[in-house]
Amino acid sequence: MIERLNTVARKARAARIPVVFVQHESADDLLQYGSDGWKLAEGLEALASDIYVRKKATDSFHQTELHPLLQKLGVTHLTI
């Protein structure tokens, strides 16, 4: 799965399509922001130029900057 994600991300970057990583976090378990458990999977090619969105709810749009960000970028379609 990691290699498939990397392939899609590489193609998106080559086409100048934004790559967005949404990371779930919680305050009191292994997904605490900045902890080893919170980090992206090993082998995932995430670049500093990619976009990172932090979330605390199961919905990536609930109380995050994702929707306004996508609107600002003019994004009308998502590949998830």
Image (tube, rainbow, N blue to C red):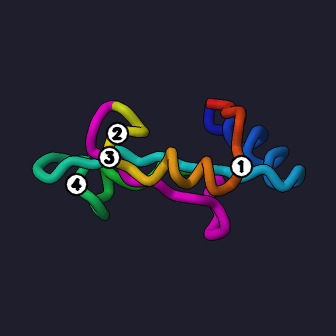
What range is drawn magenta here?
Answer: 43-58
In depth, the one of 78 and 72 nearer the eye is 72
Type of amino acid under label 4: Gln
**What's the CA distance linking mark 4 and mark 2?**
18 Å
Q: Nearer the viewer, mark 1 or mark 2?
A: 1
**Label 2, on which residue?**
62
Q: Residues within 10 Å of mark 2 (few under 14, many from 20)?
A: few
- Which secondary structure lies at badge 2? loop
Q: Which mark is residue 32?
A: 4
User: Within the magenta stretch, is there residue 32?
Assistant: no
| In front of the other: 7 or 78 | 78
Of labels 4 and 1, earlier in sequence is: 4
Among the two numbered marks 3 and 4 on one chain, the one whose residue lies closer to the N terminus: 4
Residue 59 x/y as whole percent: 36, 32
The residue sitting at the left extreme is 28
Q: Position of residue 30 (x, y in %)?
A: 21, 47
Instruction: Tell me what residue is drawn at x 52 percent, y 51 percent.
Output: 68
Residue to which mark 3 is pinned: 63
Q: Residues within 10 Å of mark 3 (few under 14, many from 20)?
A: few
The reply to whether dot 4 and dot 1 touch (C-beta < 8 Å) is: no
Q: Main secondary structure of the magenta part?
A: loop
Q: What separation in Å lies between label 3 and label 1 (alpha carbons)?
A: 20 Å
Is residue 69 found left or right of 36 in the rendered image? right
Horizontal and vertical percent for residue 25?
28, 48
Which quadrant holds the C terminus? top right
| Label 1 vs 2, first from the N-terminus | 2
